[in-house]
Image (tube, helix red, strand yellow):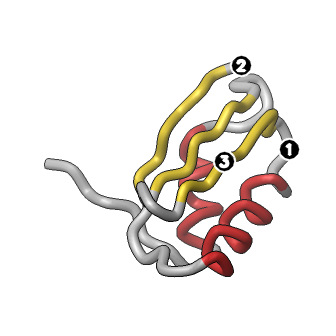
């Protein structure tokens, strides 16, 4: 199991939290999902043999949110 904290742009309400939580929980290999509206992050714990961080990030983007880019 691996734990990651993912910053998310565009979360403004409890519906955003619910949307992202549902999208992430639907992925195979997810052990836990916690989305924090105040901090604009998702904390996920997942099985790296089943799902990758790239798939998790894509699920957030596919749900209509953006991820910060770092240079």
Q: CA distance from mark 3 to mark 2?
A: 15 Å
- Could you say which disc has been placed on residue 43 in the image? none
Q: Kindly report the distance in space between the C-alpha atoms of the residues bearing marks 1 and 2.
A: 13 Å
Tell me the crowding category of disc 3: few under 14, some 14 to 19, or many 20 or more residues within 10 angstroms, Cα based: some
- Residue for badge 3: 34
* Residue 50 image offset from top left, x and y in percent: 79, 32
Percent x, y for residue 46?
Answer: 72, 31
Q: Nearer the viewer, mark 3 or mark 1?
A: 3
- Residue for badge 1: 28
Residue 1's quadrant in the figure? top right
Q: Which residue is mark 2?
A: 1
Q: Dividing the picture into quarters, in which one does residue 57 lie?
A: bottom right
Tell me the residue at 61%/55% (across/down): 35
x then y, percent, for residue 58: 57, 60
**Which mark sits nearer the N-terminus, 1 or 2?**
2
Taking the spot 42% from the left edge, 55% from the top edge, the residue there is 39
């Amino acid at each position: 199991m691996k734990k990651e904290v993912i910053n998310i742009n565009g979360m403004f309400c409890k519906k955003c939290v619910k949307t992202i939580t549902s999208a992430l929980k639907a992925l195979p290999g997810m052990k836990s999902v916690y989305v924090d509206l105040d901090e604009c992050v998702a904390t996920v714990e997942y099985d790296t043999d089943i799902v990758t961080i790239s798939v998790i990030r894509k699920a957030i983007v596919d749900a209509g949110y953006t991820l910060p880019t770092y240079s």
